[in-house]
Image: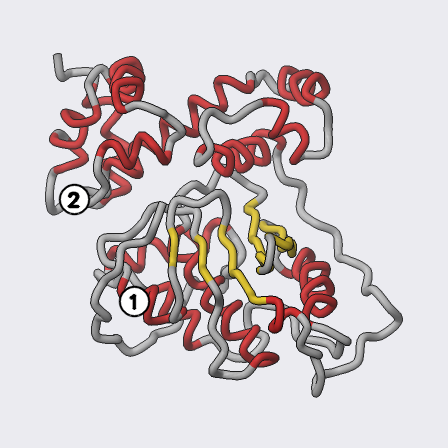
Amino acid sequence: MEAKRCPVPVRTRPVLLKTGGASIDSPAAWRALEDRARREYRPTLGLEIGEAAGDDEHFPPWTNAASLRMGLEELARSAAARRPWEALSLHREEDVWALRRRFLDGRALRRRQESELALTALKRHLQRVLGSGWRPVEIHFQHARPTNCGAHEATFNCPVLFGQQSDAIYLGARAIGTPVKGFSEARGGRRPLQSRPVLSLKGRVMAEIRAELSAGYPKLEDVAEALGTSPWTLQRRLAKQGAVFSELVDETRRELTLIYLAEQHLGLSEVAEMLGYSELSAFSRVCRRWFGAPPSRLRDGPLGQAGQGQEKLIETASTEASEWT
């Protein structure tokens, strides 16, 4: 889904996030960031904080390496301990390289500001090696496109796409071959990773389901492969926790439906596509099953009321929708 080209908006003065001591990598901080952006009417807050970030504030410091490719592989290993809710990985796609961020906990479906903060900070981190004039080939965000994406194109100075499988920064082949020098030397080869928090199986599965939605209905086989297990084993492990894969797909789609429908600038066909439905009619039928009303009526009801907090709207939408007959 291509990003809309927008005029460049006026920049506001960056103000760093204050979360009462919570780490920016925690779900509590993600919610605080979303709440602050909404409360202060600053939809580009994540971009602003990312631009104002200090060196090595959000990602581990660089160590000298023969090439940026090797440096990014080391960065991914180090970030696994520092940013335990995500995984960085480098992939070659024809003549470009994609540095992807995969979220490992699907219980936090609303995290636009954290995503935009992290990719902006990661761009600045890369510019420490490649120079301040470097720009990515392309930027991908998993979340839906905002009302105005001019700030995103101004921040990254390249095409920005939304509703993608994962967050990603695309780099050219020349950039990948650049030596990483002038930083500290790596000590003793690979550094051991710290222990990672235990993420729930349900959260991991829901994260992979969301990533697969852009390509259609998520397949059990694909999710199992992403988790390094077999479909049968995944089903068995879910059953032990009282969960069923198809029900987790429904749960993820249902929660995302309320999030996307609250974004009035998104067309219904666009929402249906982001949720993996090939036709709007199929999306309308499932909305009737979930909420007792089609998406257009759901949007015109509590999700379309002005002057209320979006979190409250989403919380009440499913209960109120059943009254619309």
Q: Which residue is drawn at 55% across and 68% down?
A: 58
- Which of discs 2 and 1 lies nearer the camera? The answer is 1
Is 321 positioned to the left or the right of 305 in the image? right
Q: Residue at x 23, y 28 (%)?
A: 317
Question: Which residue was labeled with disc 1?
Answer: 151
Mark 1 residue type: Ala
User: Residue 270's x, y, as percent?
Assistant: 28, 36
Question: As displayed, is residue 140 above or below residue 120?
Answer: above
Question: As displayed, is residue 314 above or below residue 101?
Answer: above
Which is nearer the N-term, disc 2 or disc 1? 1
Question: Which residue was labeled with disc 2?
Answer: 308
Q: Residue at x 51, y 26 (%)?
A: 218
Alpha-carbon distance for marks 2 and 1?
Answer: 25 Å
Question: As displayed, is residue 93 above or below residue 15?
Answer: above
User: Residue 35's x, y, as percent?
Assistant: 32, 54
User: Residue 276's x, y, as percent?
Assistant: 40, 29
Q: In which quarter of the image is residue 298?
A: top left
**Residue count near mark 2 (Cα–Cα under 10 Å), binned few <14, some 14–19, many ≥20:** few
Q: Quadrant of residue 183?
A: bottom right
Mark 2 residue type: Gln
Is 50 positioned to the left or the right of 70 in the image? left
Quadrant showing the C terminus = top left
Return the residue nearer the eye: 246 or 216. 216
Residue at the extreme right: 188
Q: Which residue is drawn at 36% across and 36% down?
A: 274
Quadrant showing the N terminus = top left
SS of the residue under disc 2: loop
SS of the residue under disc 1: helix
User: Residue 278's x, y, as percent?
Assistant: 35, 25
Return the residue nearer the eye: 303 or 165. 165
